[in-house]
Image: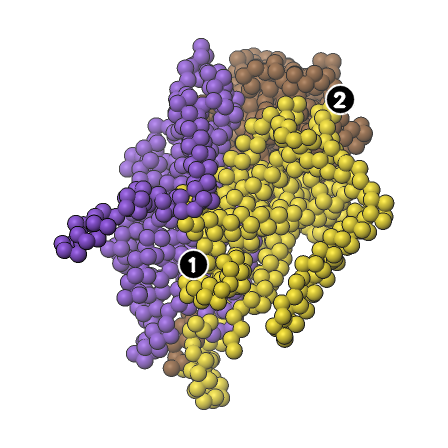
Amino acid sequence: MSITTDTMRVPAPERLAPALTTGWMGWARANLFSSWLNSIVTIALAFFIVKYLIGFVDWAFVNAIWNVPNDAAGRPDTSSCRDNKGLGACWAVITEKHRFMLFGTYPYEEHWRPALVCLLFIGLYIVSAMRRFWRKELVLIWAATLTVIALLMWGGVLGMAFVPQDRWGGLPITLILATFGLAFAFPLAILVALGRRSKLPAIKALCVLYVELIRGVPLISLLFMASVMFPLFLPEGMNIDKLLRAQIAIILFAGAYLAEVVRGGLQALSKGQYEAADALGLSYWQKTAFIILPQALRLVIPPLVNTFIGFFKDTSLVLIIGIFDLLTAGKTAIIEPMWQGFAVEVYVTIGLIYFVFCFAMSSYSSKLETELNRGRRR
Amino acid sequence: MENFSLRHIARGALGAIGAAIFALAAPAVAQTPAPAASSGGGINMIDTIRARGQLLCGVNTGLAGFAQPNSQGVWVGFDVDYCRAVAIAIFGTDQNRVRYVPTTAQVRFTALQSGEVDLLSRNTTWTLSRDTSLGLDFTAINFYDGQGFLVKRSLNVTSARQLDGATICVQPGTTTEQNLADWARGARINIRPVVIERLEDNVAAYLAGRCDAYTTDVSGLAAIRSAQQVPNDHVILPDVISKEPLGALVRHGDQRFADLVRWVHFGLIAAEEFGVTAANAAQLATTDNRPEVQRILGRTGGLGQMMGVDNAWMLNVIRTLGNYGEIFTRNLTPIGLQRGPNALWTTPGGQQYAPPFR
Amino acid sequence: MSDTAIDPRYATRPPKRPLRLSWSDERVRGIVYQIIVVGIVGAIVYWLYSNTVHNLDVRRIATGWGFLNREAGLPIAEYLIPYDPTDTYFRALTVGVLNTLKVAVVGIILATLLGTLLGVLKLSKNWLVSKVVTVYIEIVRDLPLLLQLLFWYALLQGLPGPRQAINPATGVFLSNRGLKLPFFEWVDVHSWALLLVVIGAIGTYFFHKAARAKQMADGQPRAVWPSAVIMMLVVPLGAWYFMGAPFTPDIPALRGFNFSGGLTVSPEFFALLLGLTLYTAGFIAEIVRAGILSVNQGQWEAAEALGLPRGRVMNLVVLPQALRVIIPPMTSQFLNITKNSSLAVAIGYQDIVSIANTTLNQTGQAIEGIAVIMLVYLTISLSISLFMNWYNSKIALVER
């Protein structure tokens, strides 16, 4: 071949790799069509994805109804939505009910307060997620924010009207139950985790009993306990509001699970750390506070976030004992006869809200995990 | 090197317990606890309610005609009016004097037992076992009800006897559930129950066609039917399979409060019997010369003081809410309920009867 | 890592000295602290207990377990053992426990199968497959299970009524009354045949074990499947045939309001099972994936170098090692399915929570009702934990 002889004299001009091995085509070949079977699977899957995606877009956007007119009596007339059933979504139910779904029975003209509370919560999460704030001051930030949140929700100061808890509802309840649950459960969890590793048999036994008992039963049974049994435990005349009872149940529940997470961190710490601290002559609390916990808690941040995602989702269980969280508010919104039958739209919307929160947290936690592990490997 | 472990871990655990106590106690402190009633024999509910400034009244979570928040978020309904009546009898007015606590069928008795509410006015059926084993007292029957069936008109069913093989939605934890089982056995009918906890989920299941029929008290069925866009698509079958005497409940321990609730009801009945209405009560209080009317309206007899409230107690109640008939007409006629057995005893078939005010 | 913070050497090193009754003695302080803690906890428990007793007494609330023998009067839609509303509360609660176990067992099996499949697929070299699985896992994991259950239940309720039921195959009907499948009339002969299958399975297990032991001794692999087929298939079928081979098909048909005959999967059970399975499979998939990834690539290469085909590499080399990583988190997923099945109460499937709930409502005995729920779940949780711990120790690395 002539080319062969040419190459002997001058270096061959640089050639591109075959078109089928680089660029998007090469990528597709390697990742989508590497074998006959793979090609068939890819094509079949792509077909179904496109088909259902088109169906979904048709339902959710193209054929959807976003608004319905009012009838003569001033009530929404949902007949157009009913005719459209199965073809397109009736987002009008969301347009009409979104304030109720988000804030429940909170006084309508005061809705800016729970809205602000939601923003504060989100801000708190973002600040807590930034590593430069991982200092002692974070505790103060939490305390201050939670206080402001309580003030905003209750009111009764600074010219804000007092709103009793039985009118609270919607997203703030979900955020309150999850966040206050974490804030109170966390110190409890640390102490229980330390107690579970104690050498003192009675203390260890108590902690083990608490953790295993709580982890062995479903959250629902604790919530039932809080709603029907708890009142019997208290002296006559002493009463605790339903919401706070549920909050206590969630704290106790979260405490047991978090304690196990923290214990994992304590166990993962190398023995040398304990020995070195002892060698310095530190007392138990000095050692725990300055040497052990700072390291152990850093280790458990990713599983901690995952556990928190779990609680965040689990707060929806308060629906069963009739507390007005986001999910309950959504369900209540579709009781009205004219809106009955549009459950799917409401559930999709609520699902989206939960998803945004949980997905943000879970991607954060997996990112963090990689980062922390990288640091430790070095 | 042992020195770190023992006492510090002990302290740690101590702290854990402390935190647990704190976690329990902190929210309790944040709450304003109900004024503690003196324990033992001498609980005085009326004084307790006065001191608190509010009557805590347990109502349904939302049943048209009986208790539901209207579009302004204000509770209205037949059961709600009974809460208001008791509050007026105690305070003379119901302005900000009632706090409504929505209760599900499941927590209603616990809420009353634990003192979360003073009064349970929530279409609750009076039965022997409830009266004896719950530590609660039924005061009086303010609504005679019975259990029925709601079916879709398109099913072409005209009698409950035709429901053999049907799927029937029912709420658990109610007498309804047991009545259904009793009735099916007695009538030798085979039914398939679908047992769903929440009222609204039951209704949704019925409307979606998961069940052929929904069973509950006829009053409840009427409320549900009237709330539908086309009420005529649904039929309440003529069969009534049980007696459901509904009324308000109080906790054991203070008979005087039970008496007050009972006699507020009788006062409303008596007022209807004697033609005392919201419009004419104030005038009749000074002009009417029938002795019993004078006693009811507090001009003579000092009956209010015997109850531990103001002598004008019933006058205030009737002036604000009207008599039993007016309360019924205002709340229950719109949802399509007839007086039926709830008419006065002076009407044929009526069963509402008040003992003498004397 | 050791379970306690204290190295055992330290615990034994200080010379044993007699207990001095002095505050400076660690052990004395330890004992004192323990007494204080136990005392405080005891006092709180006693306080709660005495409050409760007082409250029950003052409010004249009935207590005790006498109600268990009273007539329940509550209708139950699905039961595994014969049940009638005239039966006792005890029987009703038993039905509830069995319903919980039913959905938990089926859910565990299905979630494990689906989760394993998804976990393997997520590692697929096909980009589209692995992305689709990733998206699925993200979605189910980031939505509350309760919301998913309500969603499925609402969707199932939206199916057509029994008269317009979807009828994809003869005798199969899908409507808002659930899924109806053809079955055959169950007679005693079938129970006997089924018993033989179970006996055959146990026999196969021991045969397999013996074959394994022999292989270990002489290196000769022995085929297990012929005897398995004989024991689990031929013998039961033969027995069934000689007992008269009874077979009456039971095909569902629309009669009156509903279908009668056939096998029913109620919408409540179906929604719960669907929700539990899809949700937990998302978690199991991640566990399986992590387990497979935890096996060193060198293991694959070494096994392939020995000439083992890919399937056997998976079965004999990778899976046994991955299982060690997989089993402990899997245990907690199984526990989660069981505990999460309590959400049945929200969609009207009558599990133990739902029935105990109704019971406490009708009898007014909240404490006993909650105690029943907790006892049942603690027992189930403990049994699963014990079984999985036993299994875990069986497959654990035996170090030589």
**Does residue A320 appear in this view?**
no
Describe the element under mark 2 as helix, strand or loop.
helix
Which chain is disc 1 placed on?
Answer: C
Instruction: Quadrant for residue C290, please give it.
Output: bottom left
Q: Which residue is depicted at the point 40% across and 67% down?
A: A268
Q: Nearer the viewer, mark 2 or mark 1?
A: 1
Density class for disc 1 (Cα within 10 Å; few <14, some 14-19, many ≥20) is some
Q: Which residue is depicted at the point 70% across and 58% down?
A: C226
Q: Which residue is depicted at the point 86% across and 45% down?
A: C244
Which chain is disc 2 placed on?
Answer: B
Q: Colour of chain A?
A: purple
In this rendered view, identify the residue nearer to me: A14 or B308. A14
Instruction: Quadrant for residue A116, please give it.
Output: top left
Density class for disc 2 (Cα within 10 Å; few <14, some 14-19, many ≥20) is few
Q: Colour of chain B?
A: brown
Q: Furthest-front residue in view? A: A1
Q: Which residue is depicted at the point 68% across and 35% down?
A: C181
**Does residue A28 appear in this view?**
yes
In this rendered view, identify the residue nearer to me: A33 or A296. A33
In this rendered view, identify the residue nearer to me: B216 or A337. A337
Q: Furthest-left residue in view? A: A10
Label 2, on which residue?
B162
Marks 2 and 1, how far apart at CA: 62 Å
> Looking at the picture, how far across and down is residue C125, in whole percent?
41, 50
Q: Colour of chain C?
A: yellow
Is A103 on the left-hand or right-hand side of B143? left
Is C117 on the left-hand or right-hand side of B190? left
Label 1, on which residue?
C293
Describe the element under mark 1 as helix, strand or loop.
helix
